[in-house]
């Protein structure tokens, strides 16, 4: 054979494949390249494409060599992919290329391949389902949060307390230790906007009063150089406001939505909370099942996929370019878990024939169109334009996979 694999080494999903192309094939590729170049170039004293081949070969040797090399590398790549039965997930790179007259072309091909997920165990696991009960206390807390969101700030007397909004003038010492001009800050006490020791000073003051005293910076302060340091600061309380919450009455219920009464509003809020708890419980069970499957069926993950997912999230979150490297490092473990999750779901779907078909997607779109009172063709076109048909297909597949897994594993209710 003109192209042979002389060595094939694997480490996880990485492949290093040593390739050799015979001298005869190299020579033929160079001759073919020379003929193609001869037809294209103009040599002084000859009509276009009529110059002697030896003259063209000598004059355009670099271009001919490069064209031959590129053609041979493409041929070798196609051969290796077929022969080694590879499914690359990254663009292969050639290393240690040896291309010398009278010798075979040799190089090493590096690439990452799609991991082979072998399901040796997929049943017999026990997972726990979180409680979906919405207690009276939980409902009251949610209603209070709604009142907080509708609350308004009003001037107050006395000393500040946690939850109050204050305007303070804070003066810090300079390098010489002298306390200079202050700077105004607006803070909600207890919200973590200032270090606790400074908040404690603020809560000793009344409007217009000033305190000057030592304050110790916490040991977990973000700026390591300031951790544990004690500085004398000057704090003046300029303004104090306290949030007034709206009364929990029918007028408030009407303001929050189309509710005739507080009871109707509470019933709707409870229903939403129960649905949310059910979704979270479902997600929790699915997450645990995936963790058990990954633990029982280990496999390598392509680093390039983790990197791509991290970059996608960085763009989605609007992370500045200068901070993307740090974000990628912090997000890497989460991205790897997501990649593992998707691969294990795909493995189950493929092994058990659970992957959604085009007909399944069409049926789902019809259901959505009926529910929304839309024409099927219009909704389909809209989803296709937004690139969401793949999302629907994925959702159908995942629902089938987890239904299949739930039938074969034990789910215990949280005590």
Image: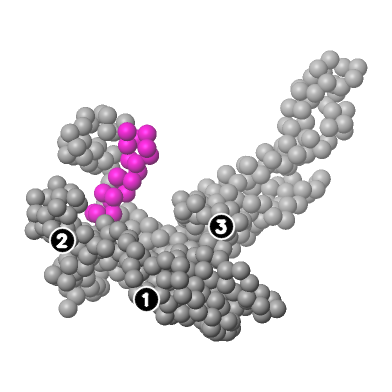
The residue at the far right in this view is: 45
Q: Is 410 placed left or right of 69 in the picture? A: left
In the displayed structure, 28 sits above or below 259; it is above
- Tag 3 or tag 1, which sits nearer the N-term? 1
Question: Where's residue 104, x and y in %?
Answer: 74, 49
Is residue 297 visible in the rendered image? The answer is no
Q: Which residue is mark 1?
A: 159
Q: CA distance from mark 1 to mark 2?
A: 27 Å
Frontmost of labels 3 and 2 is: 2
Question: Where's residue 285, x and y in %?
Answer: 25, 66
Question: Which mark is on residue 248?
Answer: 2
Q: Which residue is mark 3?
A: 324
Which one is in front, 271 or 243?
243
- Residue at figure coordinates x 37%, y 37% from the top left: 386
- Residue at figure coordinates x 78%, y 39% from the top left: 65
Q: CA distance from mark 1 to mark 3?
A: 44 Å
Which SS class for mark 1? loop
- Tag 2 or tag 1, which sits nearer the N-term? 1
- Identify the magenta region: 382-401
Which SS class for mark 2? loop
Q: Residues within 10 Å of mark 2 (few under 14, many from 20)?
A: few
Q: CA distance from mark 3 to mark 2?
A: 46 Å
In the displayed structure, 71 sits above or below 405; it is above
- Residue at figure coordinates x 45%, y 61% from the top left: 335
Frontmost of labels 1 and 3 is: 1
Which one is in front, 82 or 405?
405
């Amino acid at each position: 054979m003109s192209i042979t694999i002389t060595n094939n080494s694997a480490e996880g999903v990485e492949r290093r494949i040593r390739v050799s192309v015979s001298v005869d094939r190299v020579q033929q590729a160079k001759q073919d390249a020379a003929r193609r170049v001869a037809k294209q170039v103009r040599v002084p004293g000859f009509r276009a494409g009529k110059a002697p081949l030896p003259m063209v070969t000598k004059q355009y040797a670099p271009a001919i060599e490069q064209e031959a090399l590129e053609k041979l590398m493409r041929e070798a790549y196609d051969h290796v992919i077929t022969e080694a039965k590879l499914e690359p997930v990254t663009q292969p790179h050639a290393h240690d290329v040896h291309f010398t007259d009278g010798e075979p072309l040799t190089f090493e091909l590096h690439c990452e391949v799609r991991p082979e997920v072998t399901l040796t165990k997929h049943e017999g696991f026990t997972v726990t389902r979180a409680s979906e009960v919405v207690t009276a206390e939980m409902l009251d807390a949610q209603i209070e949060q709604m009142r907080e969101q509708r609350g308004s700030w009003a001037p107050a007397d006395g000393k500040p307390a946690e939850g109050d909004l204050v305007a303070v003038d804070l003066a810090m010492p300079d390098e010489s230790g002298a306390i200079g001009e202050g700077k105004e800050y607006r803070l909600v006490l207890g919200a973590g906007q200032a270090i606790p020791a400074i908040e404690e000073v603020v809560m000793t003051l009344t409007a217009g009063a000033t305190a000057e005293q030592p304050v110790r910076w916490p040991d977990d302060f973000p700026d390591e150089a300031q951790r544990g340091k004690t500085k004398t600061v000057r704090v003046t309380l300029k303004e104090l406001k306290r949030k007034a919450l709206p009364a929990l009455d029918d007028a408030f219920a009407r303001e929050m939505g189309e509710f005739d009464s507080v009871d109707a509003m509470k019933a709707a809020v409870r229903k939403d909370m129960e649905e949310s708890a059910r979704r979270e419980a479902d997600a929790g069970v699915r997450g645990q099942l995936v963790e058990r499957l990954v633990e029982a069926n280990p496999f390598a993950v392509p680093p390039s996929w983790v990197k791509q997912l991290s970059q996608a999230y960085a763009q989605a979150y609007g992370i500045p370019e200068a901070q993307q490297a740090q974000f990628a490092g912090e997000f890497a473990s989460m991205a790897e878990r997501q990649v593992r999750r998707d691969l294990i779901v795909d493995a189950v779907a493929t092994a058990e024939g659970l992957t959604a078909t085009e007909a399944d997607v069409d049926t789902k779109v019809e259901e959505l169109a009926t529910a929304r009172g839309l024409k099927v063709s219009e909704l389909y076109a809209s989803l296709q334009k937004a690139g969401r048909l793949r999302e629907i297909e994925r959702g159908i597949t995942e629902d089938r996979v987890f239904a299949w897994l739930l039938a074969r594993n034990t789910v215990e209710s949280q005590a």
